[in-house]
Amino acid sequence: MEACNAVEREVDKVLSKFGAINEHAETVLRDLINHIQSLKKDLEEAPPNQELTAAQVQMLKQAMTKVRDTVQRLATDHRDLHSTVSKVGKAIDRNFIADFASTSREDVFSGPEKSHLLNQIICQHFYRQGMLDIADELAVEAGIKTDEGRKEPFTELNYILDCLKQRNLEPALEWAKKHREALLAQNSSLEFKLHRLHFIRLVQQGPSKQREAILYARQNLTQFVVRYEKEVQSLMGTLLYLPHGIQSSPYSHLLDPTLWLEIHDVFTKEACTLLGLSVDSPLSVCINAGCTALPALLNIKQVMQQRQVTGIWNGKDELPIEIDLGKQSRYHSVFACPILRQQSTENNPPMKLVCGHVISRDALNKLANANKLKCPYCPAEQNPEDARLIYF
């Protein structure tokens, strides 16, 4: 962060200096243009065959000198600005590392199989983003076999998302009705929130839409009364304030523009869940994780080189330090055995003892003595077979 701040300070200096130079240049050029135009007007008003007087010649020489001096001053200011701009580049070179090879592994993308997998991930990302032409071209050039059935859901979803950005609810409502049973099975609130937004749009149009709003509520909101009783009551309460507008009513929060941002996120999440996809593409997740981890890895690599202990980082699957990628990147819980101080794996899962304490399966096997096991944290004795695999 300090590196970004250092570069930002240099950029601010450039912007400040550019603003001052630009303002000064506009003033000087405006005055110079007015002076030349005034001089031109005086010369044009003189008789056609009249020769220039000594005073007029002197005025022309002074004007030419003034133009030359002005151009030279502006050129000098321009050179000074370039000097300030170059400091931004130096600040970037000084505060950021351009060579990230020290944190990479050469074998990660080596071989045709890995390159093919990488191209598949990139192609899938383009499909998810609605960039179908780019994805198709990449698929052709990389020799990736694409199934039209796999592209169709992304085409439909991106069309619906574009409509939601334009506040067009109809395609999303049709999709939600079509997949109603599946959405209900995953306890989704998508269809209700879509109908809520449609109802709010009607009441926003005032008393002229009151009858239509009531009819819409009867047809579409009745089915949600049991699950969303309070929300439906609030929507019905807006009808009382139609004559004066709901902007100044206790229900003004229903006009919050963030509801449209929310419905965009809700639709994306529910649709991806229904299709068995993650909300973010694998490529986005990997790049975001890499950008988060890179500064810490560069720092630890530099420290290792200074202390001449680079051998500690053997380039295998385990990193030399723990890197927190944030809650959004936690897809499953991690259990560390308090006995062996190792993270659990599929082959060494966490086991819950009868007394309630949890240890790893390897620790359980090491502590077991025939048919007896004494808990390492309490006096309880139990049969090792009574331990149960636990899922977080």
Image (cartoon, grey):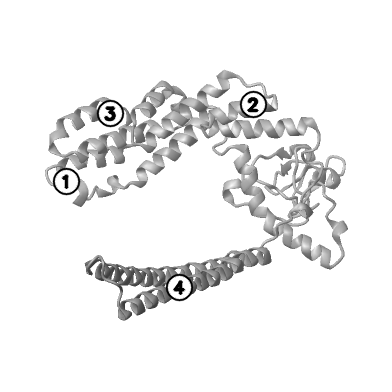
User: In percent of the image, x 63 and y 29: which residue is there?
Assistant: 138
**Residue corresponding to mark 4:** 68
- Marks 2 and 1, how far apart in space? 54 Å
- Marks 2 and 3, how far apart in space? 47 Å
Are the residues at dot 2 and dot 3 in contact (C-beta closer than 8 Å)?
A: no
Disc 3 marks a residue whose amino acid type is Thr
- Assign a secondary structure to mark 1: loop
From this view, report whether residue 196 is shown above or below residue 136. Answer: below
- Marks 4 and 3, how far apart in space? 80 Å
**Residue corresponding to mark 3:** 222
Quadrant location of residue 122?
Answer: top right
User: In percent of the image, x 74 and y 57: which residue is there?
Assistant: 321
Q: How many numbered discs, if any?
A: 4
The image shows residue 307 at horizontal and vertical percentages of 84, 67
Answer few, some or many: residues within 10 Å of disc 4's Cα (few below 14, many 20 plus, some between 14 and 19). few
Q: Nearer the viewer, mark 2 or mark 3?
A: 2
What label does residue 139 carry, if any? 2
The image shows residue 379 at horizontal and vertical percentages of 75, 54
Quadrant location of residue 261?
Answer: top left
- Marks 4 and 1, how far apart in space? 65 Å
Q: Nearer the viewer, mark 2 or mark 1?
A: 2
Q: Earlier in the sequence, mark 4 or mark 1?
A: 4
**Residue corresponding to mark 1:** 245
Q: Which residue is at the front of the view, 301 or 100?
A: 100
Disc 2 marks a residue whose amino acid type is Ala
**On the rendered image, what quadrant is the C terminus found in?**
top right
Disc 1 marks a residue whose amino acid type is Gly
